[in-house]
Image (tube, rainbow, N blue to C red):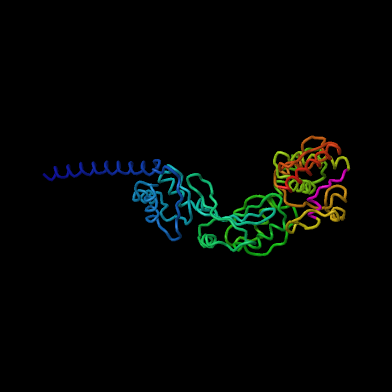
Amino acid sequence: MWRSIASNALTLLIVAMFLLGGVILWGQSQYKAAGPLADAICVKVERGSNMRRVSGQLEAAGAVTNGALFRIGADYAEKSQQLKAGSFLVPAGASMEEITDIVTRGGASTCGTEVVYRIGVTRATVQVRELDPATNRFVDVVSFEPAEAEAPEIFTKVRAQSDTRYRIAMAEGVTSWQVVDVLGKIDLLSGEVEVPAEGTLAPDSYEISEGDTRASVIDRMQLAQATAVEEIWAARDPEVPLSDPVELLILASIVEKETGVAEERRQVASVFANRLNRGMRLQTDPTVIYGITKGEGTLGRGLRRSELQRETPWNTYQIDGLPVTPIANPGRASLEAAANPDTTEYIFFVADGTGGHAFATTLAEHNRNVAKWREIEAERANQ
């Protein structure tokens, strides 16, 4: 009898073990299988949260089918205690295993709200943007100019959130003074910084965090520009009339200020290269303007005849060759155009009314283009 009982108990134990093994294998397959999400979502993990709370959020959002199984899988992977605060993008079809990795990996938030400090040529703005998980694109919530208006309530609200991300977006053609001016007004940053040499900052987007120093941001901008200049200078056309990387920066900054049309940068650069090769003065208005403002803001009006006639180290109507320094911070495309201009005979250009320019090889042709531009100006003034 006892032998029979023992035999039955052993049989039950073996069956139970097989069943448990089957349950474990089923659980593992469910944990690693594609999840039910049809569209990406943003999951916010609050500071001090735990796996139980997060699994409840995920289950409610339809990202996981079983919150308990999600927690067991995280425990088994020894990640339950590695939860990170922030807002994280969970893609469509993400498995429980993938979601566990996303919310425990750490690093910057991958979705949610971001504040962008935009440094533009004519104005500085602050944008609050929200990521749309379905499209993985940021949508503008509010935009304002700090110099013109008080910060809206939504900006104050997101500034108080721990998972808000911050970026500085520096446009091509802004001056070093403009960059430092904006950095000085961003309360996330600390410390003082001198205005760096003109042209040495790379226009780009830079992630920043609470407590970063202004000097560290400038260092990143300068390193990026120095790297780009070194690379582009090494690949330059050997016939380009530039003696060193500083002259490359100077010419690129003039190209940057003369045109915003990507397709004509190399043509504009060719005009200045041709003039330098022929010993002609560059005669470009942006250099005259820089001699007046020294990059501290915009002129805000047209040039006067007396200003065109006044000699400064930047007035290319009055001096030979390039000005003494860059007149702005050029972007990579303008650097590449200056290093490898188109091969043309152009020595003149003027606005054509479309946002671009009309190019000419002779003064007579140029004068006709100028006359057309004057007609366009007159028509616009009468509208």
Q: Which one is nearer the viewer's eye here, 218 or 368?
A: 368
The verdict on residue 281 being magenta is: yes
Range shown magenta: 280-290
Q: Who's the residue at 55% across and 52% down the image? A: 140
Which is nearer the eye, 169 or 257? 257
Q: How many marks?
A: 0
Tell me if residue 77 is in the magenta stretch: no
Give left or right: position of 64 versus 157: left
Q: Residue furthest front?
A: 382
> Residue 125 is drawn in which quadrant?
bottom right
Q: Position of residue 203 (x, y in %)?
A: 67, 50
Classify 178 as above or below 89. below
**Residue 383 locus on image (x, y percent):** 71, 47
Q: Is residue 364 left or right of residue 68?
A: right
Q: Residue at x 53, y 57 (%)?
A: 164
Q: Is residue 225 left or right of residue 49?
A: right
User: Could you say where residue 329 lies in the image, as x and y percent from the top left?
Assistant: 72, 51
Nearest the eye: 240 or 172: 172
User: Looking at the rendering, in which quadrant would you find the N terminus?
Assistant: top left
Farthest residue, direction left:
1
